[in-house]
Image (cartoon, rainbow, N blue to C red):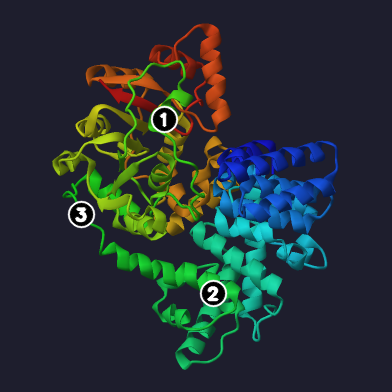
């Protein structure tokens, strides 16, 4: 792992806070000694201490990471990969820095880096596995547990890596279409194929597909459907290969696969693509409806997210130690005065536009006493969120369908309202914002996310060009448009954004049914007119936040001065490329 990721995981679970004082002190001491051994290149001694820590406190991210780094320094790549895989499961937020994850994978698996270059250089020609990975073919990388965990856990957000995976998928489809199928007897090969199928489901089959692959997939589907209908044995590679191209739940004839016993790699795919979607269908009917849903733009946006729930995610990070909301604001904005909420047994939070629920669940974990009402237009998104809710949070997070414009009718008020990436998709962003202010308690806080008109200029131009060329917002057209954009050889800035790498997120980025942008002067005017106090902008990762805080301090400016921020953005128009994310307080 790189240093930024390592700092993130260590912040997630610092050794000094691992348990009761008597144990924590000894663990913290061992951790410090382990780091000293690493600095002196005494790797065996460091490994011994990291193992002792994990024996005392299993699942500690920093210890797994430290042990992985020790194994890497010793040249024990398989052992290092196992430790980093544990980190990815326990602290999945590190996977958001995908380019750094890929760099680590290439260091662990040298053949992978060469294969990525070969696949990219040959594109759109698809090379066979032996041409990419040498005589061993896919077996050269299939056994690496970290690679498989990454594919199962997050979207692969790199074009060249995507092209390698696309090439390998084509060879697996050909093998599964053969009669009898080639391969599938090696557990590592089957495990890699399973991980790739799960990756394709996560990114909603965004990869390019050739005519030969489509023919192979139709043959696999026919063979598999016939075997299922007749109750015949099924080769384990076939359901996995089919699941690399189409979600199993979309084919009614494949529902019977969920009734069979499978090897673990097939079981993982069947659970992901049949059992979990079936559970979401069941939960959908149980989601309460708090308000009527409007028509016009609201109805169009709802339909988009029914078809493409957003955002895509797999795992929720382990719960950090909850903190007071006041402490968070004080830490983020140390020079900005604000009125403290005060310590409560209960902190009422509204997430207005929760999508598939990741942020709502993180908020419930993050703040002491948090109880969250998370609302959205889309029942598909809400059912996905409900299914992913850990039992420990079930009584503290309520998911419900509601329209922001009608929320004032529910008769509740909140200490904190989060509305990130939602207002700009309403017919009247400022009017929707005004409705949410009615739900704030006195001194209540609101975290807002809005698209910047300056930062979105390239995306606005791309959306206009896409519309002019007649691409529709269907999955097939989104895939085709995406490949057409890539084939130009031009590297547009939006191609580096995370949202370019799955169908739902690409639709949100380039095909959204409705989007409005704002400027800092508009935000400033709204705040002044609606009884709010601006606290500050928030940046991710944290080091960017600190950098701008220091810049303002050195210049003698206040970070609450929106006029200054407007000038800074005009000089750096990509500063808010993700969006404006800022905090306000009700006067």
User: Is residue 97 among the parts visible in the rendering?
Assistant: no
Q: Closer to the camera, 461 or 403? A: 403
Residue matched to label 2: 267
Q: Quadrant of residue 98?
A: top right
Left or right, residue 343 beside residue 120: left
Q: SS at mark 2?
A: helix
Q: Quadrant of residue 163?
A: bottom right
Q: Position of residue 549 (x, y in %)?
A: 52, 18
Q: Pick the quarter of the image with the N terminus.
A: top right
Give whichever of discs 1 and 2 has the lower sequence position: 2
Residue matched to label 1: 581
Q: Pick the quarter of the image with the C terminus.
A: top left
Q: In the rendering, which numbered label is found on residue 452?
A: none
Q: Residue at x 49, y 56 (%)?
A: 314
Determine contact: label 3, label 1, CB under 8 Å.
no
Q: Quadrant of residue 435?
A: top left
Q: Position of residue 521 (x, y in %)?
A: 34, 17
Is 375 above or below relative to 135?
Answer: above
Q: Closer to the camera, 526 or 573? A: 526
User: Is residue 151 among the parts visible in the rendering?
Assistant: yes
Q: Position of residue 482 (x, y in %)?
A: 52, 50
Residue matched to label 3: 289
Q: Residue at x 60, y 64 (%)?
A: 195
Determine contact: label 2, label 3, CB under 8 Å.
no
Q: Position of residue 427 (x, y in %)?
A: 24, 37
Q: Residue at x 54, y 77 (%)?
A: 239
Mark 1 and mark 2: Cα distance apart in space: 40 Å
Mark 1, Cα crowd under 10 Å, few <14 / some 14-19 / many 20+, is: some
Q: SS at mark 3?
A: loop
Left or right, residue 77 beside residue 308: right
């Amino acid at each position: 792992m790189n240093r930024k990721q390592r700092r993130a995981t260590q912040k997630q679970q610092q050794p000094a806070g691992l348990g009761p004082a008597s144990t924590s002190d000894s663990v913290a001491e061992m951790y410090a000694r382990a780091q000293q051994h690493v600095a002196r290149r005494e790797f065996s001694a460091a490994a011994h201490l990291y193992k002792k820590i994990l024996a005392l406190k299993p699942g500690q991210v920093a210890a797994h990471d430290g042990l992985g780094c020790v194994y890497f320094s010793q040249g024990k790549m398989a052992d290092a990969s196992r430790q980093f895989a544990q980190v990815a499961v326990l602290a999945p937020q590190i996977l958001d820095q995908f380019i750094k994850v890929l760099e680590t994978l290439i260091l662990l698996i040298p053949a992978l880096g060469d294969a990525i270059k070969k696949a990219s250089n040959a594109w759109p020609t698809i090379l066979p596995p032996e041409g990419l990975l040498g005589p061993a073919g896919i077996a050269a990388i299939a056994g690496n547990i970290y690679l498989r965990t990454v594919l199962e856990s997050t979207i692969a957000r790199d074009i060249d890596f995507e092209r390698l995976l696309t090439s390998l998928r084509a060879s697996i489809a050909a093998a599964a279409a053969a009669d009898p199928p080639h391969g599938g007897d090696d557990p590592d090969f089957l495990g890699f194929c399973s991980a790739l199928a799960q990756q394709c489901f996560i990114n909603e089959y965004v990869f390019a597909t050739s005519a030969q692959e489509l023919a192979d997939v139709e043959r696999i589907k026919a063979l598999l459907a016939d075997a299922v209908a007749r109750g015949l044995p099924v080769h384990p590679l076939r359901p996995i290969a089919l699941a690399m191209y189409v979600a199993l739940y979309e084919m009614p004839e494949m529902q019977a696969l969920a009734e069979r016993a499978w090897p673990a790699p097939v079981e993982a795919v069947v659970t992901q693509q049949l059992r979990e979607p079936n559970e979401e269908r069941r939960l959908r009917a149980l989601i309460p409806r708090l308000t009527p849903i409007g028509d016009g733009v609201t109805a169009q946006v709802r339909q988009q997210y029914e078809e493409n729930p957003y955002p895509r995610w797999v795992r929720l990070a382990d719960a950090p130690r909850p903190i007071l909301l006041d402490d968070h604001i004080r830490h983020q904005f140390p020079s900005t005065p604000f009125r403290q909420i005060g310590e409560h047994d209960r902190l009422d939070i509204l997430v207005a536009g929760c999508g598939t629920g990741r942020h709502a669940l993180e908020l419930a974990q993050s703040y002491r006493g948090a109880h969250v009402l998370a609302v959205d237009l889309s029942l598909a998104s809400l059912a996905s969120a409900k299914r992913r809710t850990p039992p420990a949070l079930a009584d503290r997070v309520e998911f419900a369908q509601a329209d922001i414009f009608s929320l004032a009718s529910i008769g509740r008020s909140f200490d904190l309202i989060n509305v990130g990436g939602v207002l700009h998709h309403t017919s009247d962003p400022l009017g929707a914002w005004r409705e949410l202010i009615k739900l704030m308690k006195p001194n209540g806080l609101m975290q807002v996310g809005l698209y910047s008109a300056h930062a979105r200029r390239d995306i606005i131009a791309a959306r206009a060009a896409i519309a002019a060329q007649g691409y529709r917002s269907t999955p097939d057209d989104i895939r085709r448009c995406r490949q057409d954009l890539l084939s130009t050889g031009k590297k547009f800035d939006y191609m580096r954004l995370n949202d370019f790498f799955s169908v739902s997120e690409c639709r949100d980025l380039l095909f959204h049914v409705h989007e409005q942008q704002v400027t800092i002067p508009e935000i400033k005017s709204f705040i002044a007119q609606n009884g709010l106090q601006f606290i500050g902008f928030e940046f991710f990762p944290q080091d960017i936040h600190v950098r701008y805080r220091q810049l303002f301090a050195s210049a003698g400016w206040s970070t609450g001065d929106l006029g200054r921020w407007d000038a800074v953005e005009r000089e750096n128009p990509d500063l808010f490329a993700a969006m404006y994310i800022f905090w306000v307080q009700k006067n």
